Image (cartoon, rainbow, N blue to C red):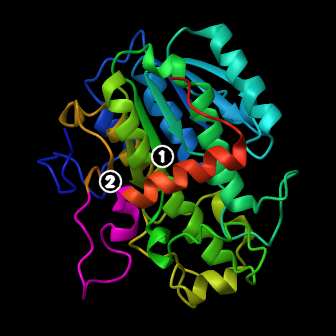
Amino acid sequence: MITLQEPVASPFGYRSTAREVVAGIDLTGKVAVVTGGYSGLGLETVRALAEAGAAVIVGARRPEVAGRDLAEVQGDVTILSLNLGDPGSIDEFAGEVEAITPKIAILINNAAVMANPLTRDARGYESQFATNHLGHFQLTARLWPLLKAANGARVVALSSSGHARNGLDLDDLNFASREYEKWTAYGQAKSANALFALELDRRGAEHGVHAFAVDPGGIFTPLQRHLPHEEQVAMGWYDKDGKPNPLFKTVEQGAATSVWCAVSPLLEGKGGVYCADCNISAPWMEGQPPYQGVHPHVRDAALAERLWAVSESMTGITFAT
């Protein structure tokens, strides 16, 4: 059954928080995995899920920092080392998760880099695409048997309104023949995240696994660490006096849609959709502001299938049948 890309009657919205959307939902006995779950949106996502009773496994590039930042979170939280830019680290993390639990009910692919200078991983892949998409593609594949075993698992892929900037160049994903531009690379990676959720849901539905792409909204987090303040002012994130844009969400509000997709009863049996503000987003229409709604290139099923094949080739990973 195909889920329509149209809003539902959600009781939550733009300013809802992660704790609010999970209130009254008991996650006792469920295991959740959250990448980058110790900073920014990830930390608030972990807090909400753990307080609702889930056993949360956090994949952390800096486990010692994660231990410090998650110390005050109430609930069952396990921290494991994970570097999404290192295929060996991904495999090791997946093996450690498999040793802890036979099934995963929630996987939130939250960790990301944004608009950084050109860097490449050990394979020569551009870092934003490699970390944000390929790393999570490999991780989800390695955890696939555990997701299928959960009988109703949900996978949440963090995308962004940045997908509206541009789509993918499948012939030059690594900027080998075109000049690197940090925002083009980010738009490409975030488009890939949304397309991954679309194709993963198609493939996972028969196993009871559903996937969702999420735009968390504008939030000030460590994700902006590569952006000079002057650039953020020029983009309207701060005014000339240094005051933040009032339309930006708090971190607690920014984590809400990820948690809503992971737990909302309204999404039971649904999937493959792009969500924002604790609802399924409406399609972008000609004449609307560019960063409103979901653009057609990330709803392209044929493109999603092509990206999947390219991702398998680039990682050497296929999902276990």
Please, what secondary structure does the residue beneath circle 2 have? strand
Count neighbours of disc 2 (C-alpha within 10 A) and say few if under 14, some if 14 to 19, many if 20 or more: many
Q: Amino acid at mark 2?
A: Cys
Q: Quadrant of residue 92?
A: top right
User: Is residue 290 within the magenta segment?
Assistant: yes
Q: How many marks?
A: 2
Q: Is residue 157 left or right of residue 268?
A: right
Residue 157, numbered label? 1
x then y, percent, for residue 35: 61, 37
Q: Residue at x 32, y 73 (%)?
A: 292
Whether residue 315 is visible: yes
Q: Residue at x 78, y 59 (%)?
A: 125
Foreground residue, 98 or 169?
169
Please, what secondary structure does the residue beneath circle 1 have? strand
x then y, percent, for residue 126: 76, 63
Q: Earlier in the sequence, mark 2 or mark 1?
A: 1
Q: Residue at x 53, y 25 (%)?
A: 144
> Most extreme residue toward the right, as rendered?
122
Quadrant placement of the N terminus: top left
Residue carrying label 2:
275
Q: Is residue 250 left or right of residue 233?
A: left
Q: Amino acid at mark 1?
A: Ala
